[in-house]
Amino acid sequence: MPALSIISSASLSGIEAASVNVETDISPGLPNIFLVGLPGNAVRESRERIRSAISNSGFEFPMRRITINLSPAATRKEGSHFDLPIAIAVLSASGKAKMDKERLEKGIFFGELSLDGAVRRIEAAAALVIGRYEAGARDVYLPVENMNEVPSLKDLRYHPVSSLSEAVSLLSPGAERNTFAFKHERESLPDVKGPGVEEAGDRREDDIRDVYRSDYSEVLGQERTKRALTIAAAGRHDILLVGPPGVGKSMMAGMFADILPPLTETESMEVTRIHSIAGLSGGHELIKKRPFRAPHHSSTMTAIIGGGHNRVMPGEVSLAHRGTLFLDELPEFNRQALDMLRQPMENRYVDLSRTGFKERMPCDFLFIAAMNPCPCGHFGDPLHACICPESSIDRYRAKVSGPLMDRIDIHVTMDHIPSGDAALFAKKERNGLSTEEMKKSVEDAISFRKERVDGDLRFSDEAASMLDNAYSKYGLSMRSRSKLINVARTIADLEASAEVLPVHVGEALSFRREQR
């Protein structure tokens, strides 16, 4: 009779599904269960669930000394999904149930046990499955209730179980496999990383995208804003839209995701894992649309940045990973929450520290913000008089810190379309650039960038001189200068130019100058 058994499972650390071996040793001694290896509260409580589940499933619980080690011992383990692998390990080590050694070695096990031996749904199933799939796992045993939320992946075999006795039966020598068959094959996704618009995704579209299901060609005028959004999409540049109420800031931001390139398969898996941890993913498909998150300005700092107690939950910045984070009415957000965005915008990840542990969540998002020029919204508006005292305008603008504004690559001022121009536009079948044209420009710029090395896109002598003069004249910070260079290079890519010319620097500078 074997005295030692090793069963594979996993534990989430950020979005990574780290491998965990459930090592079980049964030896002579007083009947007791010793659980070691930094188990969390839910894992420690599994001892009583497992004892009852084994007995109530028709198996004899070993009345000996049972030592269970969750290896590696130095990493924290959280979640009730360890119940099933621990129970399987106990039965295997005790010899109370005959199981195929090869199936035990190749399988990855997840599942919470009820006292009667039923296998219950677990949280973040897709994140756990995808993480182990990327590490090479191909046989996964998990609750039947989770089968509606895990993706179909090439060569991955699911073995859904509804009870502990069913799991043991599947693992018995010569038992027939009951692999799950998906009704629909997953659409293939490109597995290529684009160097320009790198990485992003979302199954759940935010309310703002549901409202503005239109085309950029339906927008009256605003060609300069369309151009700025095209540049932002082509080079993944953060952008700020400033203008009076009703000028179209929210509408144009809401359509932005439609001009972004599709997710690669690697990115799609990454985004699906994050949304799975947040409890937002579902179905048998990987998330294929780039996320578009638009939190309300009343959102707390934790809701935006992420956090939690025993389990770290991704915030809006991580849910927007590989996609877009849109903050409408920017000055209305909590000042501390806005300043907390500075590190994620710079590093593309956020460290969430809690007592005894720290998690790192990715948040590589494209930032779009919109705001009025003053509290009443009509400062500088030729159609409406501004009623705000100068002091209230200063206080309003001071709600957004200078360091945050300095991190935004492109600043655009939007104005109302004059009535004469609006009437002229109304007679036309279309109004300037369409969504499809903007998307094609973005794709062409990315393709052009792929064919060259960034260092090969040099500034002409005139462009370099223009850049140096702008740095001195406008007192740009080194960060602003770097962002100006990057925007100019993106504009050159859009024009398929072999070098950065003065016209490209001039256009890039116009989007930086407006903030001043």
Image (cartoon, rainbow, N blue to C red):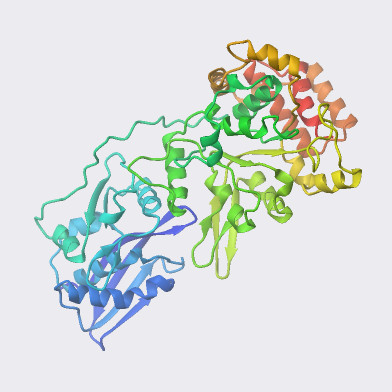
User: Measuring 55% from the left and 48% from the top, which residue is drawn there?
Assistant: 318
Q: Residue furthest left?
A: 174
Image quadrant occupied by the C terminus = top right
Using the image, determine if residue 465 lies above or below residue 471: above
Residue 460 in which image quadrant = top right
Q: Nearer the viewer, residue 158 or 144?
A: 144
Image quadrant occupied by the N terminus = bottom left
User: Measuring 11% from the left and 52% from the top, which residue is drawn there?
Assistant: 176
Residue 240 in which image quadrant = top right
Residue 72, how many percent across, how many down? 41, 65
* Residue 480 appears in the picture as rendered: yes
* Residue 199 appears in the picture as rendered: no
Using the image, determine if residue 472 lies above or below residue 452: below
Q: Nearer the viewer, residue 207 or 448?
A: 207
Residue 507, how many percent across, how many down? 75, 21
Using the image, determine if residue 353 lies above or below residue 322: below
Using the image, determine if residue 3 lies above or below residue 208: below
Numbered circles on residues, count: 0
User: Measuring 58% from the left and 41% from the top, which residue is drawn there?
Assistant: 365
Q: Nearer the viewer, residue 348 or 146?
A: 146
Residue 467, how many percent across, how many down? 81, 25
